[in-house]
Amino acid sequence: METTVLVVGGGATGAGIARDLALRGVDATLVDRGGLSSGTSGRSHGLLHSGARYAESDPVGAEECIEENRVLRDIAGACLRDAGGLFVQLADDDPAYFEAKREACEEVGIPTELLDGDEARERVPDLSSEVERAMEVPDAVVYPSRLVAANAADARDHGATIHPHAPVEGVTVSDGRITGVDLGGSVGGRIEPEYVVNAAGAWAGEVAAMADVSVEMRPTRGVMISVDYDGLGPVLNRCRAPDDGDIVVPHDSEVVLGTTSVRVEDPDEYETAEWEVDETVRQCAAMLPPVAEAPELRRWWGVRPLYGPDEEDRGGRGISRGFFRLDHAEDGVANFASIVGGKLTTYRRMAAATADLVCDRLGVEAECVTADRELLGADDPERLDALVAEFDGRSVTDEDVVRPPDGAR
């Protein structure tokens, strides 16, 4: 079996790459091991960033977020919920941090509105009496399983091949090029690509190692707890340096509380500690007190695909979630690249940067058009949910919202 480009990893970035390449007329095959969005994309808290979280620490990343936020509002339809967001300052929080963030948002171009505590409580009646002021920003909620499925379906409709259950079992490198990739699962055979893109997220190091290439990942785990709470309007963010339990994300009749950041050695095998749940609930309740006693509906952990060298250079949690495009021609494998790091919010930009590299290497002269074309089925939630079922892509993040057709899982 042959393909021009093999994309390994069926999360948002991988599906976005397949879509981008297909829209440029490039033959692409997308593979994942456990159904689309089964990795980090489908195990997040589902925040579509405005960029405000990173405005003072990483203005370039913040600018990328607000730009992609606007693009996705145009193209992603029912993959999103336009909730808005509040960064809230509690009595014990440093007011200088609030001011620095607000000034940084202004410099980056993230629109803000300043609210005093009473005005904030008019927006969110159960907001803590300890909230002294808040800053409104254009955060939103993203439903990752719909987003990934829409990208994959759009890719397929433009000629791509999608294999949701085809794990990579081996890679053959000959004379400085990948000449074959062995796939298990539904494929059960060898594929011979002209180019390979590693978009495996937290597992990128393992995929790269199959080609004798080193990609140093530094994954961290984080817990999310969904509790029964109806009627929260905006996303709530604690306006302090990133820490445990500083975000509350609204769904229909639930809110998702998050999160922690604990380094893991293996993205498949790691501890899930009860203290993470307790601390996350406690800290989130400082913003929204009723969640402390709200019935827990479900909990899950996700693993962030952080790039090791960037983590070492910056030295701290939440300072940057930039992405890195690694051309492995520099490592002796000419037809191989990895895309690592980043955020769900910037998946389309990550895909575009990767597709640019691939097209350059293949001699394809075609521009990226993904920012200007609505995703397949974006205006039809039922169709999106049918696509999620088709690609076995239902994720824990949005399982309360996504409703597969009767008879589907």
Image (spheres, grey):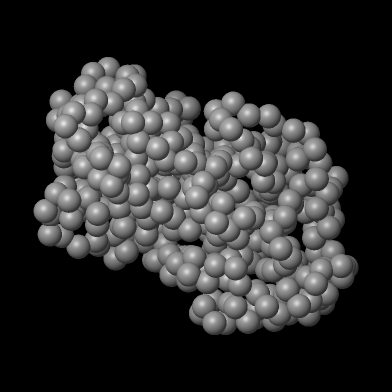
User: 186 or 394: nearer the eye?
Assistant: 186
Q: Classify residue 43 by image quadrant.
A: top right
Q: Please state the horizontal and vertical placement of residue 116, each as a whole percent of the image.
A: 78, 80
Q: Please state the horizontal and vertical placement of residue 385, each as a whole percent of the image.
A: 43, 41
Tell me if 407 is positioned left or right of 104 in this view. left
Q: Is residue 256 visible?
A: yes
Instruction: Name the residue rendered at 80%, 58% in the picture.
Output: 288
Q: Please state the horizontal and vertical placement of residue 76, each as a whole percent of the image.
A: 40, 58
Instruction: Name the residue rendered at 55%, 56% in the picture.
Output: 313
Asked if 355 appears above or below 132 in the picture, the reply is above
Instruction: Name the residue rendered at 25%, 40% in the picture.
Output: 332
Q: Is residue 66 visible?
A: no
Image quadrant for the N terminus?
top left
User: 264 or 29: nearer the eye?
Assistant: 264
User: 300 or 213: nearer the eye?
Assistant: 213
Q: Please state the horizontal and vertical placement of residue 205, each as a whole percent of the image.
A: 43, 36
Tell me if 82 is positioned left or right of 337 in this view. right
Instruction: Name the residue rendered at 24%, 61% in the picture.
Output: 368
Q: Classify residue 115 by image quadrant.
A: bottom right
Asked if 269 appears above or below 83 in the picture, the reply is above
